[in-house]
Amino acid sequence: MAALRPHGRVLFWPTLALLGVCTATGYFYGNLAEPWQDSALLGVASAAVVLLWLLPLASWLNRRYTITTRRIIFRRGFFVRTRQELLHSRGYDVSVRTTWLQTLSGSGDVIIASGSERPLVLKDVPNATLVQRVLHDLIEQSQTGFDSRRREESAFAADQTTIWNGR
């Protein structure tokens, strides 16, 4: 089982904003003319931290991809959670799309076309080419296992039919 999240690089700008807000708050707090302005500064800084750092962090933490030997599970959402599953035995096409920034960090978007109206996308996954190779191997193993089980079931059914007809 592999549990994946989008690359942590997406938290760079929110973390930079957090540092900027904390620096500006520390610089201006206590240096303002009126005492109520310090309280207002803390309120504005708190709102900025929530909007610029906490919400992007929560969004990043609530997007998960789990790859097992039988399926891929997509989980996302904060207030409304969505869970999608895709079985390897159904077969699908896997491709990787990378931007220049993703290439520098070794990540990429893994696009899974399962025959539905929209392809499922594992956004900005680290080691995207490795994920693609693993998914191809899992599809192949699942389909060869499915074919052998189907042959065993048809052979068992043929044996049962022979016994049934022989009586």
Image (spheres, helix red, strand yellow):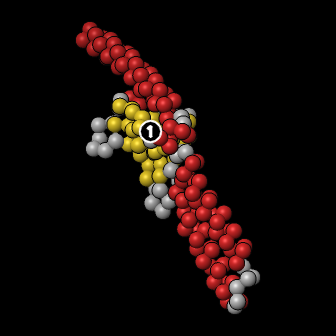
Q: Do we see residue 126 in this rendering? A: no
Residue 97 x %, y %: 41, 37
* Amino acid type at mark 1: Thr
Q: Is residue 93 left or right of residue 131?
A: left
User: Percent x, y for residue 165?
Assistant: 24, 11
Q: Nearer the viewer, residue 49 or 112?
A: 49
Q: Is residue 28 left or right of residue 143?
A: right
Question: In front: 4, or 165?
Answer: 4
Q: Secondary structure at mark 1?
A: loop
Q: Is residue 130 above or below residue 85?
A: above
Residue 123 visible somewhere in the drawing: yes
Query: Which quadrant holds the C terminus?
Result: top left
Q: Residue at x 35, y 31 (%)?
A: 93
The residue where tag 1 is placed is 98
Task: Specify the farthest residue to the left.
Answer: 165
Residue 6: horizontal and vertical position, in percent? Answer: 52, 46
At 43% from the left and 26% from the top, the residue drawn is: 136
Q: Dot 1, how many residues are within 10 Å of its Cα: few (below 14), some (14-19), or many (20+)?
A: some
101 sits to left or right of 36: left
Occupied quadrant, residue 148: top left
Q: How many marks?
A: 1
